[in-house]
Amino acid sequence: MDSGRSDTVTSTKIVVAGGFGVGKTTFVGAVSEITPLRTEALVTNESEGVDDLAATPAKSTTTVAMDFGRITLAEDLVLYLFGTPGQERFWFMWDDLCIGAIGAVVIIDTQRLDAAFAPLDYFESRGIPFVCAVNQFEGAHRYDLADVRAALALRPGVPIIAIDARERRSVKRALLTVTEYSLRQLDVALAAGH
Ligand SMILES: Nc1nc2c(ncn2[C@@H]2O[C@H](COP(=O)(O)OP(=O)(O)OP(=O)(O)O)[C@@H](O)[C@H]2O)c(=O)[nH]1
Ligand SMILES: [Mg+2]
């Protein structure tokens, strides 16, 4: 009898990226079913003048290699999450973190929109499907998502959603969005013979 259960479990990889302090580590930690692997180091005095801590005054640590987590998105689909470091001096690691990823979530802090352009260009230029997740920090102005889309000059079709990186449900919704979108893009690429 068919129990309706799938015997095969597919696992796939999603990268969680974005500028310094936008909430990547928080995002991975909010949904991971395993204790997330974190590689945090103290934000040192050396960061002064290099990284803008004004928008995240409570921040004392930064990711120096990666965040790693896992979530079972559906009975037959497991996502492995790889969070990137945000400080620019560690961006050389992004290429390794992206190997084999089907898609990416680019987290945006509207208080520092300019920090979003480099991450967006990164995925755009490599043809890795991505969705934009606007992390709604308390006290930050809530912009209309259509306005954020325009300000970031996102291509039509690139999903943009509002999230709270601390909320499991919100993060899970973002992961569903990126998975569906990335699989659709993969279909389109396959149909086009790429
Ligand atoms: N209010 C609010 N604070 C948040 C949210 N997400 C993250 N934070 C805070 O913002 C700060 C930065 O979060 P992290 O998750 O460390 O950001 P990150 O992108 O991993 O930072 P780097 O690894 O240094 O680039 C922390 O103090 C978090 O507690 C959010 O949705 N709302
Ligand atoms: Mg981090």
Image (tube, rainbow, N blue to C red):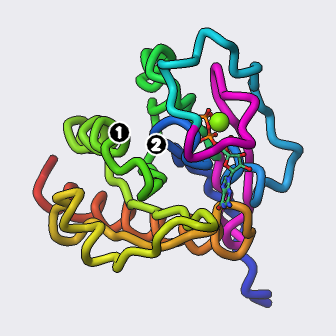
Q: What residue lies at 69% left-to-right and 21% top-to-bottom?
A: 43
Earlier-in-chain disc, 1 versus 2: 2
Per the model, the C-alpha gap separating discs 1 and 2 is 6 Å
Residue 41 figure quarter = top right
Identify residue type, mark 2: Gly
Q: Which is nearer the eye, 184 or 152? A: 152
Kind of element beneath mark 2 = strand
Q: Please identify the residue farthest to the right as the structure is shown.
A: 35
Marks 1,2: beta carbons within 8 A: yes
Label 1: how many Cα within 10 Å (few below 14, some 14–19, many 20+):
some
Considering only vertical position in the picture, is 82 above or below 140? above
14 vs 83: above or below: below
Q: Quadrant of ligand 2?
A: top right
Q: Position of residue 29 (x, y in %)?
A: 77, 50
On-image quarter of the N terminus: bottom right
* Label 1 sits on residue: 119
> In the rendered structure, which amino acid carries the disc numbered 1?
Pro
Residue 13 in sight:
no
Image position of 146 (left or right of 30)? left
Say if the magenta span includes residue 174: no
Residue 161: percent from left, percent from top: 44, 73
List x then y, in percent, for residue 135: 54, 62
Above or below, 15 relative to 76: above
The dot on residue 142 is none
For mark 2, what is the residue?
A: 18
Instruction: Please provide the residue range marked out in magenta.
Output: 54-80
Residue drawn where x is 44% and y is 54% of the image: 111
- Find numbered disc 1 in the image and state the secondary structure of the residue it sits on: helix
Viewer-side residue, 193 vs 39: 39
Q: Residues within 10 Å of mark 2 (few under 14, many from 20)?
A: many
